[in-house]
Image (cartoon, rainbow, N blue to C red):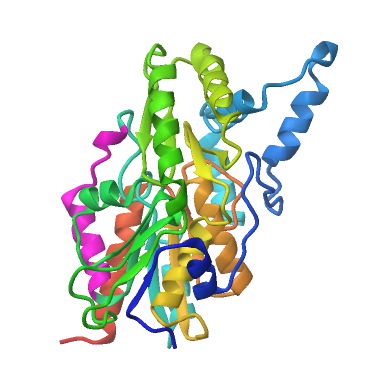
């Protein structure tokens, strides 16, 4: 079993700890097609084939648009069909999920934005409600619980304000264990993983350059998440997206050790190391001593494309399940769905109630 008193600060040590090497994510990751929805890769090929005069599509701009789809009147009908046939509601199927977890240790992983808090225009104001905080606190009382976010660990920790959780910021490139009070935690335990420390100075350099380059674009915002950067364009008029993308790409040409990925109305800049939320999930299971255990049931809840890396790990391991938070149909490796943060809170509350019912006072 893994030594719980571990301090891991570089990529080599992290890989040794979990013995895994995931493939790099790309701007357009390969996606599943089992539910019949058109994949991003196929969509781009289709657009390319229909462009007149052989015009080449700006891949980054197209990806920005594809990550920000316009809601249609038919979305409600599509959601109902998708939920019933492909990704049933985790609330409707709650008893089935709990039956699958019987005799196993549940471990809970939660994304933050769009999962515990609503997506808002100003990322600095993505506050979770006190009711949601109470629900997460209740879950952490009974199960090892981690927040896995693209935000910096310090920022997401300041939003959640619960010291009994594991926090994995910067898409899992900055992980720290609880500072107090969980029964799974040994005395004086320190769990730290920062596989991208060598990139800190480069990230800060790019951050300063980006701030200067895009300051003239109304609504554009750069968030420094310590080991990665987020360029938010939620408040940028669509006519300016092309210019924003061009500025980002021009800067990135000088930094081959960094790569671009996409989120919900955000361009993300990350180190090129093979590390993502899936690796973070595996590292946390390892640090808890569950790496070789068949008696665990990880539940990962997230809403973003970056969460798919964790969903894929759970499918590959054949353990636990992923729950996608989305009101619209999406290609996903998750097994179940929830529509919005309020349903996530309901699920977490039911999970606590289920656990309490197993051991009534």
Question: Residue at left 46%, top 69%?
Answer: 283
Q: Quadrant of the N terminus?
A: bottom left
Q: Nearer the viewer, residue 81 or 60?
A: 60
Q: Position of residue 178 (x, y in %)?
A: 25, 68
Q: Is residue 254 above or below residue 276?
A: above
Q: Is residue 218 above or below residue 148?
A: above
Residue 129 colored in magenta in the image: yes
Q: Is residue 32 left or right of residue 144?
A: right
**Which residue is nearer to you in this view: 179 or 70?**
179
- In the rendered structure, the answer to whether residue 233 lies left or right of residue 292 reads left
Q: Main secondary structure of the magenta part?
A: helix
Position of the C terminus, as image quadrant, is bottom left
Q: Please provide percent x and percent y for residue 275.
A: 53, 57
Looking at the image, can residue 330 be seen? yes
Query: Does 127 lie within the magenta span?
Result: yes
Q: Is residue 228 above or below residue 45?
A: below
Q: Position of residue 323 (x, y in %)?
A: 48, 59
């Amino acid at each position: 079993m893994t030594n719980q008193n571990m301090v891991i600060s570089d990529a080599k040590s992290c890989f040794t700890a979990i013995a895994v090497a995931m493939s790099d994510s790309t701007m357009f990751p390969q996606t599943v097609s089992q539910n019949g929805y058109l994949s991003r890769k196929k969509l781009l090929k289709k657009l390319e084939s229909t462009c007149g005069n052989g015009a080449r599509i700006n891949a980054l701009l197209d990806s920005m648009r594809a990550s920000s789809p316009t809601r249609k009147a038919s979305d409600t009908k599509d959601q109902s069909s998708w939920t019933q046939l492909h990704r049933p509601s985790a609330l409707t199927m709650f008893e089935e999920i709990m039956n699958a977890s019987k005799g196993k240790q549940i471990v809970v992983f939660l994304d933050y934005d769009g999962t515990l808090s609503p997506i808002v225009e100003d990322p600095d104001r993505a506050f979770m409600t006190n009711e949601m905080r109470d629900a997460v606190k209740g879950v952490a009382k009974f199960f090892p619980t981690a927040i896995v976010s693209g935000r910096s660990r310090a920022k997401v920790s300041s939003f959640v304000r619960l010291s009994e959780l594991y926090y994995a910021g910067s898409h899992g490139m900055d992980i720290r264990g609880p500072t107090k009070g969980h029964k799974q935690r040994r005395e004086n335990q320190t769990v730290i993983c920062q596989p991208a420390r060598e990139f800190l100075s480069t990230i800060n350099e790019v951050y300063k350059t980006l701030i200067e380059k895009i300051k003239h674009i109304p609504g554009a915002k750069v968030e420094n998440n310590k080991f990665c950067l987020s360029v938010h364009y939620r408040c940028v008029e669509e006519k300016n997206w092309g210019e924003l993308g061009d500025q980002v790409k021009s800067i990135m040409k000088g930094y081959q050790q960094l790569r671009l990925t996409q989120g919900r109305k955000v361009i993300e800049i990350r180190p090129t190391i093979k590390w993502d939320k899936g690796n973070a999930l595996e590292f946390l299971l390892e640090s808890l001593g569950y790496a070789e255990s068949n008696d665990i049931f990880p539940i990962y809840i997230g809403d973003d494309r970056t969460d798919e890396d964790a969903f894929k790990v759970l499918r590959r391991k054949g353990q636990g399940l992923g729950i996608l938070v989305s009101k619209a149909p999406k290609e996903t490796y998750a097994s179940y769905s929830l529509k919005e943060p309020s349903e996530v809170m309901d699920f977490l509350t039911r999970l606590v109630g289920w656990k309490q019912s197993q051991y009534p006072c």
